[in-house]
Image (tube, rainbow, N blue to C red):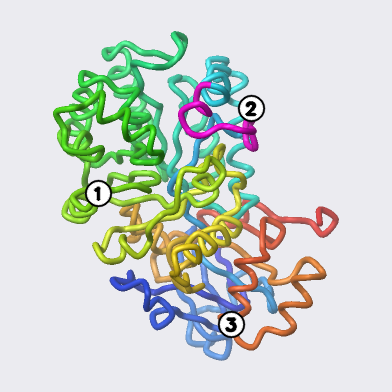
Amino acid sequence: MRYAIRAAFFDFPTPIKDVTQASQHARYIEDGVLFIHDGKITALVEWESRASIPDWQGYTYYDLSGQLIMPGFVDTHIHFPQIGMVGSWGEQLLEWLEEYTFPAEMAYQDTEFAKEMASRFLDQCLENGTTTALIFGSVHEAATDALFNAAEQREMRIIAGKVMMDRFVPDSLCEAVSESYQQTKNLIERWHNKGRLGYALTPRFAPTSTPELLTAVSTLKQEYPDVWLQTHLSENPQEIAWVKQLFPEHQDYLSVYHHYALTGPRSVFAHALHLEEQEWECLAQTHSAISFCPTSNLFLGSGLFNLRKAHQHHVKIGMGTDIGAGTSFSILRTLSEAYKVQQLQQYSLTVAEAFYHATLGGAVSLSLDSQIGNFEVGKEADFIVIDFAVTPLQKLRQARSRDIWERLFVLMILGDERNIRQTWVNGRCAFQRHVEEE
């Protein structure tokens, strides 16, 4: 299990405080070689310096010259049981949940169906270059087991959780608080910190959570302080008004979660489109993270994420595809939409910042940057092999690109899953695209 892979390489060696200056912190090696031993990175050097690595000729050698290798993409918000409803027409958030989401999630009470869909879901992640994901499950314990089993078989690093909800959902999806608590506890005991797997407490969002359920989530967080917490926050104006009606004793939406001690370094809040100033301050003070989900925010007409505001408050940001309101598993497509969302707000998102959020920045937002996110020695060997040009238009545009930054920007704007040639997880190739698939 020792590999030496020659290619071009791009990453960020260390976390960045001011991501608007990300280009100054990037590392690009036009002709390098990556050494991997037992799933871990042992060195990344210029090709001409390969002889400095002891026994370098004893590694299995792959020559991928002309292609680019970067760390695997980190998806910080995605829904496992919504893969079959992507592209459902015509609704905004609350109506969309009723019309499409809840009926789709009911199907996951069938364990065999959940197993089949778990395989399809994770295979789609790998095909799109996603090697780590923070994943919402359905409300069903067995379906969440199926997801973890499938990830374990693929050696993927995922963090996932069974959705918890006890009101304003169809009866077949509605839990008793005691049931939700016990099933979540069972799953944590079975899967959390098992190999490359982690557990995330997953209350769907405040409207489907009674105070009693949020108290149970808080209790679990105290009992298992190293688990993650994922939920939704301020996605839609109608949703925010509903939260204020349901929780009038709290100042704002985030205060509901903060009251139950659900903010913190391992807490990730999806969307955060319509925050008040004190909510930004709370996220920053508690070292909580936001998942920026541009494709779903546009698809449901929810709003435009204020990335500059996040920078001003030094709030951690990761990218989320948000399947199935999001319309693609591709982080490349997601970054393309992120660029356009920021253009509408007169903020020019640089390609360096974008790829930082998709790789090391995503790892930082999940508190996983000591394990993944770049090519530093000792990191887990999760990476993707990228072909810059797989369509006639890409080939035309790449031929006219002047430097690596322009090449990466063209990749970000015109690229998609077809540009992912290989996806490696834990030091082995888990996906390889064949030419005939183009």
N-term mark: 2 or 3: 2
N-term mark: 2 or 1: 2
N-term mark: 1 or 3: 1
The disc at residue 367 is none
Q: Is residue 351 visible?
A: yes
In the shown orientation, is residue 388 left or right of residue 351? right
Quarter of the image for residue 418 reads bottom right
Q: Is residue 42 visible?
A: no
Local SS, label 3: helix
Is residue 225 in the magenta section? no
Q: Which residue is at the front of the view, 386 or 323?
A: 323
* Residue at 22% in and 48% down: 279
The x, y position of residue 23, in whole percent, is: 43, 80
Residues shaded magenta = 84-98
Kindly identify which residue carries mark 2: 116
The amino acid pointed to by label 1 is Glu
Whether residue 25 is situated above or below residue 247 in the rendered picture: below
Disc 3 crowd, CA 10 A, few/some/many (<14, 14-19, 20+): few
Of badges 2 and 3, nearer the viewer stands 3
The quadrant of the picture occupied by the N terminus is: bottom right
User: CA gap, disc 2 to disc 1?
Assistant: 42 Å
Local SS, label 2: helix
Looking at this view, name the residue that lies furthest to the right: 436
The x, y position of residue 106, in whole percent, is: 54, 17
Of badges 1 and 3, nearer the viewer stands 1
The disc at residue 404 is 3
The disc at residue 276 is 1
Q: Which residue is at the front of the view, 224 or 102?
A: 102
Disc 2 crowd, CA 10 A, few/some/many (<14, 14-19, 20+): few
The amino acid pointed to by label 2 is Glu
User: CA gap, disc 2 to disc 3?
Assistant: 40 Å
